[in-house]
Amino acid sequence: MKISTRQSGNATVFDVTGDIDLQSSPELRKALLDAARQGPSPRLVVNLQGVKYVDSSGVAALVEGLKSAMGQGGKFVLYGLGPAVREMLKLTQLITVFQVAENEEDAVRRAG
Amino acid sequence: MKLSLTLEVQSDPRLLSVIRSAVERFAEVVGFSEEDCRAITAAVDEAVTNVIRHAYQNRHDQPIRIVFEGRDDGLEFVLTDRGLAPDPAKLRGRPLEEVRPGGLGTHIMARVMSRVEYETSAEGNRLRLFKALESKPAGGG
């Protein structure tokens, strides 16, 4: 898994590629929590277009990022969900907990 | 039809992607749909992850044996490890109404697979995961 970060509008965008599993999820968790804690009102967008697989520890990292950002009065938006990621969020019944955008423009607008 | 494959791996998280590839391809060969293959892969991945995290307490040099068996009625995986026995309370999973990380793996296995059975003996822990194959139309696949 690789993570790179950039600014788009008012949002910090995390471009994540590769598989998010027990091996890689601690890195994602740290990146999201570090950014969320830089608040106030962090605006975080996670681009999952390059992610082919996410396990429950990856979902947990996203949940922690969401809760931390919301706790700071910020926003947390996902986009680019492929079938495996979408199915995992449905399996864990967390798909409705996240704001899921159609594309980056929509995601940045929602985070704005 | 009976197909079988055995993987003997270390409890190293770097090998999870290798196991996932094998599981997904095997499920495909047995005849599951693309969506089922992804779900079965996730269930087995969660099972192996639980062994690494809980049975072996994140030690990465311990043995895990995974036997795959494809049959006319479905697909079975038998995972064997020599780590700590699972906590029966955690095997039931947790309610998902509370949005928090952790405890999702057991839920995923139960949702995806047709049958999940744990067994502990002097030889170690054994987990059987069975997914039934829906009957295919005649002449298909």
Image: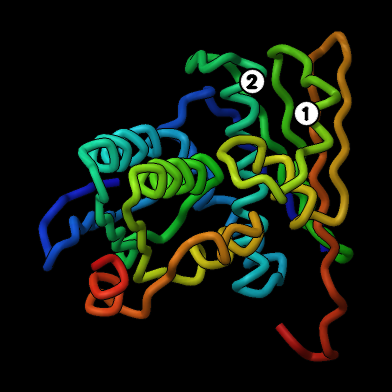
From mark 1 to mark 2, how far is it between C-alphas? 11 Å
On the picture, is A92 further left or further right than A9?
A: right
Instruction: Give the vertical position of B10 relative to A5 (above or below).
Output: above
Q: Position of residue A40 (x, y in %)?
A: 24, 44
Could you tell me which chain the residue with mark 1 belongs to?
B
Q: Is residue A20 visible?
A: no
Q: Position of residue B43 (x, y in %)?
A: 67, 49
Residue found 35% across the figure and 57% down from its top: A76
Q: Nearer the viewer, residue A17 or B13?
A: A17
Tell me, yes or no, whether dots 1 and 2 are on the same chain: yes
Amino acid at circle 1? Lys
Secondary structure beneath dot 1 equals helix
Q: How many marks?
A: 2
Residue B54, numbered label: 2
Q: Are marks 1 and 2 in contact (CB under 8 Å)?
A: yes
Residue found 62% across the figure and 41% down from its top: B46
Which coloring applies here?
rainbow
Q: Nearer the viewer, residue B133 or A58?
A: A58
Secondary structure beneath dot 2 equals helix
Q: Quadrant of residue A100?
A: bottom left
Residue at numbered disc 1: B90
Amino acid at circle 2? His
Instruction: Give the vertical position of B52 relative to B31 (above or below).
Output: above
Q: Nearer the viewer, residue A111 or B13?
A: A111
Q: Quadrant of residue B44?
A: top right
Residue found 78% across the figure and 15% down from its top: B85
